[in-house]
Each structure stands twice: as structure tokens, then as C-alpha cells.
Image (cartoon, rainbow, N blue to C red):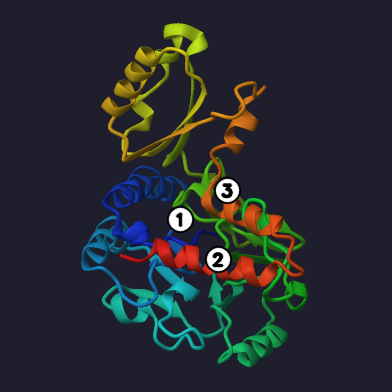
């Protein structure tokens, strides 16, 4: 039998942005639920971080995510299993106070705030929530005693990419989890696999760090242990390249796909200000949610788009490169501090 695996939904991201809610809605209504119906899937496991903020939930966000995610699950009679993630908990050292238990009790769902073995169609799966100081010993004991071949959780393993190119050097060793045939985890938004560990990745883009990095969800066959990936076809972050050496051909780009999205215009060559104004007018007419122009004023002889993209890097990459250039004896504390500050800033009103 097949079960759907989705993780790191982060309802309320970007200060409860309505544009992102509508982006999420499109994913669920036009891709996620239709795929589940087509595949005959009746069970969903959410691997942590349902909501974006740990401390509180915006009422409008709660109403919207109920409308496009939780209500369809109830209407279709689907079974929902939620593993508690680090963004779901109020206190950092215990999973006791968590958003799914407090906010979603009216729905027929199972919430796992402690390690729990669950049977799906005669297949035993260990559900592993966020591991903290309060439940560490319980979690390690559950792993040692588990007879399951599969573990699903919200885990922070060292040596994996948090975002593409950003490898984490702290967290758990995954050696204790080598006994499982398969471990699937949420937490890191970049999809990756090493040994028996599968980071499933977030279902959609949330920041510029996610640009050009595939997003989606998975379906797990409990009998064959086959994990099938379904890539989200909808994109929020776009980079477009302006080069008026092409003449009016530059105006023939597909601007409609940029509606309600975040756009960076990377200027490769701008010799005709009038043509550039026409280009920006056409882009604005497509009604993007946000637009930024990145001009390369220092090197007009760049050879390819890959170099140009470097001129429009995401915030995390810029911070990491700056810290590396400081030539500190140990970059880790500074990187960790700025990563925490960056993500705290994203969720601050």
C-alpha cells in the first residue's frame, strides 16, 4: 500500500504573506490532492513543521491552511499523521506544547510528540519527532528497541545540506539510524540522500535560497519500500536576464509565467534605456508579487549566465561567503548565529 509523505509546509511563511498562501493553495488544489486521488493514496504523513512560527499562529493563516489543506483531507476521508517538528513546538527543550495538538484537535489526525511505532498495512514504521534535551534518552532507547525497517522523522543530522551548498557540521550522527533500511526526514528543505538517510525536502519554494532547487512530495510503497518523488511544477522565484544586444527580441520573453512570483532581473547588457523601460513595463504588466533589478556594473564581459547568477545570490550564500572571507579560526559559531538571526527575521512582523 502507498502513503504520501510531505514535510516542512511552514504555513504562515514570510509574515503570513497572502501571495505565498495562494502559491501553496495552487500546489495543493492543482497538484498534491489530484495526485493522491489518481494514485489511490488514503494516508498522509506530515514529517514536521506544519506552521512557520513557533510562538504563535496568525488567525488568517490558520483559516487559509484549513481551507486548502486540512478541510480537503477531512472531506476526502483521508488519514493524517503528523510528526512534531522544531517549528511546531513552543519550548526548545520539550515537545509537550505543540501547535498540532493545540490547534488541530478537531480533525481526525494522529500527532506524534514522542517516538511511536505505527503499523501501516502490516508494515511497522517508527515515527520520530524532533529530538531535544528532554526526550533524547527516550528517542535513543526507542531506536535501539525498534523492530521497524522504516523510520520517519524530523531530524537534524550533521553532514547534510540544509540548503543547496550549505552543509551542516552540527547535529546528530546518523550512525544510530543505520539499523533501518530507510530513514525519511524533514527539517532540511533541500532534498538529498546519503546512505539510508533521505531528506525529503520542502514541498515548495519559500526564500531565494530555494531558487532552482526542486521541491515536491513523495509517495512511499510500504511493501516494496520504493520512494517515488513528485516534483512541484509551480515556481515562486524566477531570475530573468536582460540583454538588449538582442534588440527587440528581449521583449519576447514569457512574462505571463511571472505573475504573482518573485523576480530578479539580472542585467547583462543595457545600452538602450528606452528598450529597458519597455522591458520593465512588460514585466510589471505581468503583475509579479515582487521585483528586483540586479545590475552588473563592474564586469560587462561575463561569458555565461552561470557567472551572472552569482551576481544575484541569495542572502544566506552572501552571508556565508562574507564570514569565510573573515578568515576566522572557527567559522561555525558565526555561521550558526547569522543563520538563526536570518530565519528569525523572516518570521518577524
On the image, numbered disc 1 is attached to which residue?
41
Quick one: SS at disc 3? strand
On the image, numbered disc 2 is attached to which residue?
338
Going from N to C along the chain, the mark reached first, 1 or 3, is 1
On the image, numbered disc 3 is attached to which residue?
229
Going from N to C along the chain, the mark reached first, 2 or 3, is 3
Residue 276 in picture, x, y percent from top left: 38, 18
Q: Is residue 125 left or right of residue 243?
A: right
The residue lying toward the viewer, choosing from 312 and 272, is 272
Going from N to C along the chain, the mark reached first, 2 or 1, is 1
Residue 18 in picture, x, y percent from top left: 26, 52
Quick check: 74 above or below 228?
below
Quick check: 284 above or below 125?
above
The residue lying toward the viewer, choosing from 259 and 119, is 259
Which residue: 38% across, 70% down? 53
Q: Residues within 10 Å of mark 1 (few under 14, many from 20)?
A: some
Amino acid at each position: 500500500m502507498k502513503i504520501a509523505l510531505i514535510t516542512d509546509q511552514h504555513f504562515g511563511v514570510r509574515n503570513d504573506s497572502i501571495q505565498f498562501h495562494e502559491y501553496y493553495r495552487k500546489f495543493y488544489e492543482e497538484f498534491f490532492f489530484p495526485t493522491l486521488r489518481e494514485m489511490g493514496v488514503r494516508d498522509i504523513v506530515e514529517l514536521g513543521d506544519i506552521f512557520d512560527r513557533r510562538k504563535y499562529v496568525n488567525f488568517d493563516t490558520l483559516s487559509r491552511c484549513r481551507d486548502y489543506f486540512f478541510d480537503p483531507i477531512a472531506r476526502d476521508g483521508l488519514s493524517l499523521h503528523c510528526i512534531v517538528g522544531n517549528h511546531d513546538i513552543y519550548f526548545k527543550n520539550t515537545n509537550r506544547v505543540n501547535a498540532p495538538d493545540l490547534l488541530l484537535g478537531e480533525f481526525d489526525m494522529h500527532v506524534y510528540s514522542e517516538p511511536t511505532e505505527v503499523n501501516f498495512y502490516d508494515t511497522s514504521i517508527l515515527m520520530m519527532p524532533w529530538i531535544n534535551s528532554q526526550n533524547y534518552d527516550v528517542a535513543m532507547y526507542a531506536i535501539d528497541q525498534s523492530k521497524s525497517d522504516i523510520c520517519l522523522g524530523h531530524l537534524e543530522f550533521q553532514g547534510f545540506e540544509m540548503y543547496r551548498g550549505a552543509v551542516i557540521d552540527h547535529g546528530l550522527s546518523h550512525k544510530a539510524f543505520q539499523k533501518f533500511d530507510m530513514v525519511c526526514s524533514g527539517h532540511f528543505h533541500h532534498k538529498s540522500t546519503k546512505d539510508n538517510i533521505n531528506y525529503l525536502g520542502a514541498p515548495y519554494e519559500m526564500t531565494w535560497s530555494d531558487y532552482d532547487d526542486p521541491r515536491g512530495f513523495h509517495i512511499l510503497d510500504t511493501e516494496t519500500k520504493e520512494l517515488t518523488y513528485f516534483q512541484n511544477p509551480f515556481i515562486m522565484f524566477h531570475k530573468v536576464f536582460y540583454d538588449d544586444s538582442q534588440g527587440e527580441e528581449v521583449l519576447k520573453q514569457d512574462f505571463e509565467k511571472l505573475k504573482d512570483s518573485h523576480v530578479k532581473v539580472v542585467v547583462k547588457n543595457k545600452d538602450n534605456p528606452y528598450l529597458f523601460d519597455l522591458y520593465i513595463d512588460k514585466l510589471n504588466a505581468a503583475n509579479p508579487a515582487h521585483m528586483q533589478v540586479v545590475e552588473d556594473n563592474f564586469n560587462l564581459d561575463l561569458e555565461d549566465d552561470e557567472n551572472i547568477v552569482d551576481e544575484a545570490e541569495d542572502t544566506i550564500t552572501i552571508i556565508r561567503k562574507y564570514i569565510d572571507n573573515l578568515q576566522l579560526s572557527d567559522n561555525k559559531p558565526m555561521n550558526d548565529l547569522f543563520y538563526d538571526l536570518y530565519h528569525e527575521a523572516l518570521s518577524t512582523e
